[in-house]
Amino acid sequence: MSETLTAPAPRPAARTQAISLRQLRFFSALADTGNFSRAAERMIVSQPALSAGIRQIEEHLGVRLFERSTHHVSLTDAGAAFLPHALRLLKTADNAFVDMSDVAARGKAVIRIGAIPSVVPAAAAVVAQLSGRCDDVSFHLSDGKNDTLFGSLRSGALDIVVGVLGRTEDGLEATLIAEDEMLLVAPKDHPLSASSTLPWSALEGSEIVHFVGGSIGELSAAAMRQNNLTLSTRYKVDQVSSLLGLAGSGLAVGVLPRLYTRGLDTDRVRLVPLVQPQIKRKLMLFHRTKLHDEHPRAAALCALLVPALRDQLAV
């Protein structure tokens, strides 16, 4: 038997300020478990206390967040729309508590930066430079795939991301840092290795090893589709070193952005720029539009990060 609830009357936006972090944690736990009993157990509260907290949020917002029945609890459309905002607020709050402790103990603001792996060496060099100039900042640097980093940026787990431009997203600001050209990776004795540049069409008929995912895989696969090229069904990789190994052995050729070839052992392969068309991935610095209000120190630091990263990536 379903529990019939009347949607609360809409309340002024200012009333949402009365929602507590504890209530948001109740909401998050119930959305995750889909069960009042399990959510209450996770939050170490009684089930009536959790139910009361959920009702209070719904009264403040003026909407019903969950559909309730005897055996099942699921998010309403309003609840599903509210969930990512609640999770971002909780992550921001968690970060703020950690940052306050760090500031109290060390007198430094924490700034969390995420970067795709190919940019990490440049980002690390920049962080090392800025650490000496910004005595009031404790830098945290981590890597990850492009989509993962964007998820962390949206949730508030990261303040700044250096990644690849994909689809534009509301609520994010982006600044171009560099454009990264695509290269053919081929054995040194391969017929294509003798050229200084190559059109994409020259790869027709070749066994082309490719990445199974990530920003490189998406970009190279799209470029090959545009040029009527077929990806190998025999060779798929997830690591740059694997692609280089396959190409170096003569089993296949591959495609990589130039930045990924920095510092790699290329004794057995030749790198040839691909043109006609010339396809470049755009490396950008991203942050939330509201970062200026949420974390002014991190927002101000972006003005230093952009030119410093440009210099590092231009080397």
Image (tube, rainbow, N blue to C red):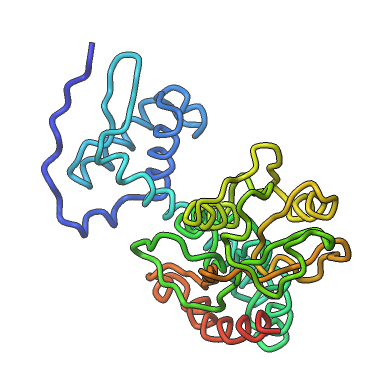
- Quadrant of the image occupied by residue 136: bottom right
> Which corner quadrant holds the N terminus?
top left
> Which corner quadrant holds the C terminus?
bottom right
- Describe residue 265's horizontal placement relative to residue 237 as left or right: right
Could you say where residue 78 lies in the image, as x and y percent from the top left? 25, 41
Identified at 52% across, 76% down, the residue is: 298
Q: Which of the pair 158/58 is nearer the observer? A: 158
Q: Which of the pair 197/244 is nearer the observer? A: 197
- Quadrant of the image occupied by residue 57: top left
Could you say where residue 240 lies in the image, as x and y percent from the top left? 74, 55
Q: Is residue 124 above or below residue 188?
A: below
Identified at 79% across, 49% down, the residue is: 246
Q: Is residue 77 above or below residue 266?
A: above
- Quadrant of the image occupied by residue 58: top left
Could you say where residue 13 lies in the image, as x and y percent from the top left? 19, 57
Q: Which of the pair 130/189 is nearer the observer? A: 189
Could you say where residue 158 lies in the image, as x and y percent from the top left? 54, 62
Residue 110 makes an appearance in the image: no
- Describe residue 181's horizontal placement relative to residue 63 as left or right: right
Identified at 48% across, 65% down, the residue is: 165
Identified at 76% across, 59% down, the residue is: 186
Q: How many marks?
A: 0
Q: Which of the pair 186/160 is nearer the observer? A: 186
